[in-house]
Amino acid sequence: MKIGFIGCGNMATAMLKGILKSGEVKNGDMIASAKSDKTREKIEKELGIQKADTNAQVVDFADVVFLAVKPQFLEEVLDEIKDNVKEGQIFISIAPGKTLQWLGEHLGEGTKIIRTMPNTPAMVGEGMTALCVNEQVTEKETLLAVTLCNTFGKTEVIPERLMDAVVGVSGSSPAYVFMFLEAMADAAVADGMPRAQAYKFAAQAVLGSAKLMLDTGKHPGELKDMVCSPAGTTIQAVRVLEEKGLRSAVFEAQLECVKKAKGM
C-alpha cells in the first residue's frame, strides 16, 4: 500500500509521523507535496519520505491520497489532479465544510472518498478523528482508513450529518481548552506561582480530568459533584463560573464554529 499527502502542514505532518511510527507503511511507500521549498525539504530531511514536485505526482504514486489542504484552496487542487485519478484509489479529505458530494463532483463520479476531521492533539498521538465515507468505499477500505487514523489518536465512524458538529466539539475545541488553561495559569500566577509551574499544574489537571472521565465512563456532572464538597472551595469556584456564563459561552462559541463550518 502506498500513501500520499497533498499538503504537509502541521496537521499532515502529525498524521504522517503517526503512520510512519506505527509501521503500517514504510518510508519508501510514502510521498508528500507542499507549496513551499522549505516544507518540501522538511518532507525529505525530517520525515524521510519522498517529496513530490507536483500534486499530480502524488496521485500517480499513491493508492490512498490524503487531501491535507485548507478548504479555500481545495477546489484549485482538485481541478489540478482530477485527470490523474485512477480507478480504485481512495481519497481522504481533512477539509471542514466540504461534503462527500462536493468532493465527488470535483474528483469524478465513482471515486472512493472519505471525509475526516482530525484535531491538533494528533501531534502528540492523542488526536480525535471523525470519519465518514461515500457509497463507493467498502467496509474493508473504511477499516483501513480507521487503522491509519488510529496511528495518531482515536477514530470514530459517524454519519456525515454530524461532521459539522465534530468541527465544534473536537476539531476546533483544542483552542478553547488552551484558552481555559491559559486563564487558569494566569490566576495561579496572580496568586504567586511561577508561570511555568502554573502551566504544568493546569495542563495536568485538564489531562487527568479528561482521562478520568474516559476511563470511568462517568457523566461529567457526576465527576464535578465528586470534587464539590459541602461548603468547600470548589463549589464557590463553580458558582462564579456559572454566574459568569461559562457553559453559555462554550455553547454559543461552538454553535458559531459549526455555523462557519457549514458555510465553507
Image (cartoon, rainbow, N blue to C red):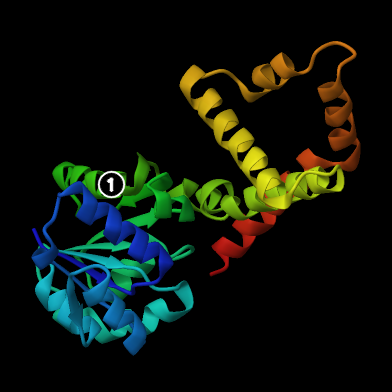
Q: Amino acid at mark 1?
A: Thr
User: Is residue 101 in sight in this rendering?
Assistant: no
Image quarter for residue 5? bottom left
| Percent of width and height locating residue 82 | 22, 80
| Percent of width and height locating residue 69 | 39, 73
- Left/right placement of residue 264 relative to residue 198 reads left
The local secondary structure at tag 1 comes to: helix
User: Is residue 132 in sight in this rendering?
Assistant: yes
Q: Residue at x 67, y 16 (%)?
A: 222
Q: Residue at x 19, y 69 (%)?
A: 48
Count the numbered circles shown.
1
| Percent of width and height locating residue 145 | 24, 49
Q: Is residue 249 above or below residue 63?
A: above
Quadrant including the N terminus: bottom left
Mark 1 packing: few (<14 Cα in 10 Å), some, or many (20+)?
A: many
Q: Which residue is mark 1?
A: 151
| Percent of width and height locating residue 152 | 33, 48
Q: Residue at x 49, y 26 (%)?
A: 214
- Left/right placement of residue 226 relative to residue 129 reads right
Q: Is residue 32 above or below residue 135?
A: below
Please name whichever residue, 166 or 243, is drawn nearer the observer in this view of the structure.
243
- Left/right placement of residue 241 relative to residue 180 reads right
Q: Residue at x 30, y 84 (%)?
A: 79
Please name whichever residue, 223 or 169, is drawn nearer the observer in this view of the structure.
223
Please name whichever residue, 246 or 74, is drawn nearer the observer in this view of the structure.
246
- Left/right placement of residue 53 relative to residue 78 reads left
